[in-house]
Image: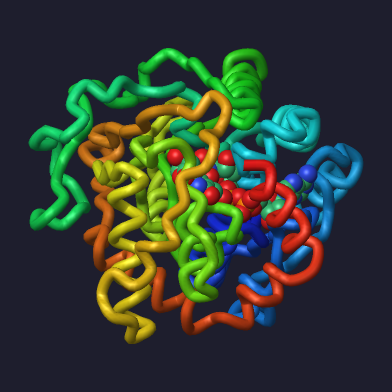
Amino acid sequence: MKSIIITGGAGFIGSHVVRLFVNKYPDYHIINLDKLTYAGNLANLKDIEDKPNYTFIKADICDFDKVLEVMQQYKVDGIIHLAAESHVDRSIKDPFTFAKTNVIGTLSLLQAARLYWESLPEKYENKRFYHISTDEVYGALEMTHPEGIEPPFKTTASSGEHHVAYGEEFFYETTKYAPHSPYSASKASSDHFVRAFHDTYGMPTIVTNCSNNYGPYQFPEKLIPLFINNIRHHKALPVYGKGENVRDWLYVEDHARAIDTIFHNGTVAQTYNIGGFNEWKNIDLIKVLIRTVDRALGNPEGTSEELITFVTDRAGHDLRYAIDSTKLQTELGWEPSLQFEEGIEKTVNWYLNNQEWMDNITSGEYENYYNEMYSNR
Ligand code: NAD
Ligand code: TYD
């Protein structure tokens, strides 16, 4: 594998994947194909933009002709597809954009890859189409133990105050798809198209479904960076519903390492779940965040708890996500590297030390979006 397109490389997870591949594989040519929507930011890649094995191309994945041209020009043998509309709240307001980018965009990439690879003498040999998806396609799990139980798996949460699972059920690779939001419905649809291209045309595809990511460079409409920034500016923290929903959190660099492992060693046509067995109720997570940010800012403990503001719940808000990543851990030997509190500490420090990055995003257009979004809650 020498020439690889990474779509959505200017976004949150994509930028970590691009950085990892550019630094780790100097003999690969990494082509970052990104439309630079509101979520795409080339400042995420400042440290590697001058590397000789890196090229950025501003393009829309829905632009089939352009994608095909790039594939032919760079003789692409691998695609790692992360470009997407990724925020559930936006999908509730504007589902069409999600269908267009996530479904039609993925189909356009698949079709371009198919035309290009089938035109080569070796066809699909040593080629790979790797599609990055989410655990949200599986729907929501029951919370059979609201106070939590001893988890059946090794967890990345530290063993002190938090070390629980909120139910016996988990998302497995075999779990039936049951998406509830327009976002997850569009991702589910794209996953089906990817698998259909394997089954119908023999394209060597892989799909992975990962739990919630956190870490540096995440767009501040998502819970963790939004709340860190609001605490810093002493602004309200809008907690949806009662804050009882459970998410399973993974440090973004651990996801990028999993993508590297699976891209190179995963089996074609397989699905792998990616997660760190790290379930948190939103309200508990928010309290850890508050404690960590207050400590970093030198505020007395508990100062920012008064910012917690319970607001109207998200429509169709999935109750619990919890990934079982045993297959990836046992078959491919991947493991999360960080304990959760360590990851949160690193993340808080990164955002507090990169205020300019945050200010550039939260000024202007995004500020208007944010104010409108939250004034309606
Ligand atoms: P993000 O919103 O931060 O970034 C998305 C990137 O895609 C941006 O750079 C944007 O400019 C680009 N993009 C959007 N539409 C495009 C188009 N039409 N053509 C080309 N580029 C386009 O997203 P993220 O959080 O980094 O998520 C990346 C992928 O991982 C998505 O497919 C998402 O579904 C999946 N995922 C995310 C999480 C998470 O917690 N963030 C968890 C599991 C899976
Ligand atoms: P989010 O970061 O949007 O990720 P996802 O919806 O993909 O899980 O939200 C994480 C959780 O936090 C989710 O249960 C919704 C909740 N949430 C809030 O309570 N307030 C907020 O302002 C946001 C953005 C999210």
Q: Position of residue 135 (x, y in %)?
A: 44, 32
Quadrant of the snapshot with the C terminus: top right
Count the labels in the image.
0
Q: Position of residue 115 (x, y in %)?
A: 80, 31
Q: Position of residue 247 (x, y in %)?
A: 37, 40
271 and 264: which one is in front? 271
Q: Visible in this render: residue 295?
A: yes
297 and 320: which one is in front? 297
Residue farthest right in this picture: 65
Query: Which image quarter: residue 3?
Result: bottom right
Relative placement, left or right, of 318 versus 14 is left
Q: Residue at x 36, y 55 (%)?
A: 286
Residue farthest front in this picture: 306
303 and 158: which one is in front? 303
Q: Residue at x 28, y 69 (%)?
A: 302
Q: Position of residue 239 (x, y in %)?
A: 46, 47
**What's the coloring here?**
rainbow
334 and 200: which one is in front? 334
Relative placement, left or right, of 103 versus 259 is right
Q: Residue at x 59, y 26 (%)?
A: 181
77 to 244, vertically: above or below: below
159 to 360, vertically: above or below: above
Q: Residue at x 50, y 25 (%)?
A: 137
Q: Visible in this render: residue 126?
A: no
